[in-house]
Amino acid sequence: MVIKDVKLVKVAKTPGDYPPPLKGEVAFVGRSNVGKSSLLNALFNRKIAYVSKTPGKTRSINFYLVNSRYYFVDLPGYGYAKVSKKERVQWKKLVEDYFTNRWSLQMVFLLVDGRIPPQETDLMMVEWLKSLNVPFTIVLTKMDKVKMSERKKKLDEHKKAFSKYGEYTIIPTSSVTGEGIDDLLNLISTLLKEN
């Protein structure tokens, strides 16, 4: 997939804010500070998603229109301790509505920090996606920060942790070096039947 143009078209804080569905869309979810915005910018090959060092900045569902045909959807980060219980409940409701009612959703990319073992919240997200029958692919982020001598161990660690939920594709990525970006774009292109 070649991304020719991209723009943020909707910041949704309620389901009523969602733009009308298009031909297809993919969504990105992960713990706060896992690198969602950086990964999106790497996929877009331009800085359009806001990157912050402060966890939990994305508190809405952000719809990016890609090539005037598809949405890449940035979901709020989960697992940030300084978010109130009320905000966590609102986030869960908003995202669950998105997962269950967005017929154009083709795939969720679950971003997991490749430097550390999957966290309990990551495993809970897998269980939640499975319970909702939402298709997902696991994307390991920040792999440029993993020493070459540690990479196989880290990949095996993640494969083992997620294997109890089934067989899943795991794509190692780095928004810094570009590792895995073409693999992700190729998968997205296949999912969206991009020509």
Image (spheres, rainbow, N blue to C red):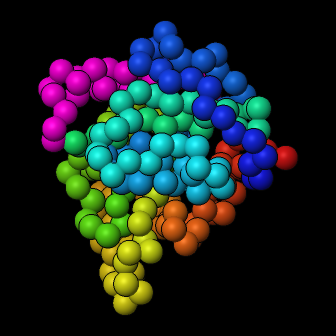
* Residue under the point 55% across and 49% down: 40
- Establish if 97 lies above or below 118: above
Most common SS among magenta residues: helix
Left or right placement of residue 162 versus residue 121 in this view: right
- Residue 16 % position (x, y): 49, 9
In the rendered image, residue 25, in percent from the top left (x then y), is placed at 62, 34
Inspect the magenta stretch and tell me whether residue 97 lies in it.
yes
Taking the view exactly as shown, the residue that stands out farthest to the right is: 195
Seen at 46% across and 58% down, the residue is: 139
Is 84 on the left or on the right of 177, as rendered?
Answer: left
- Residue at 23 percent across and 24 percent down: it is 87
Whether residue 192 is visible here, answered yes or no, is: yes
Residue 163 seen: no
Part of the protein shown in magenta = 81-105
How many numbered marks does the figure carry? 0
Where is residue 52 drawn, in percent x and y?
38, 48
> Camera-side residue: 65 or 107?
65
Q: Residue at x 27, y 67 (%)?
A: 116
Q: Nearer the viewer, residue 61 or 162?
A: 61
Using the image, determine if residue 10 lies above or below residue 30: above
In the image, residue 111 sits, relative to residue 140, either above or below, namely: above
The quarter holding residue 58 reads top left
Q: Is residue 88 magenta?
A: yes
Which quadrant would residue 183 be assigned to in this image?
bottom right
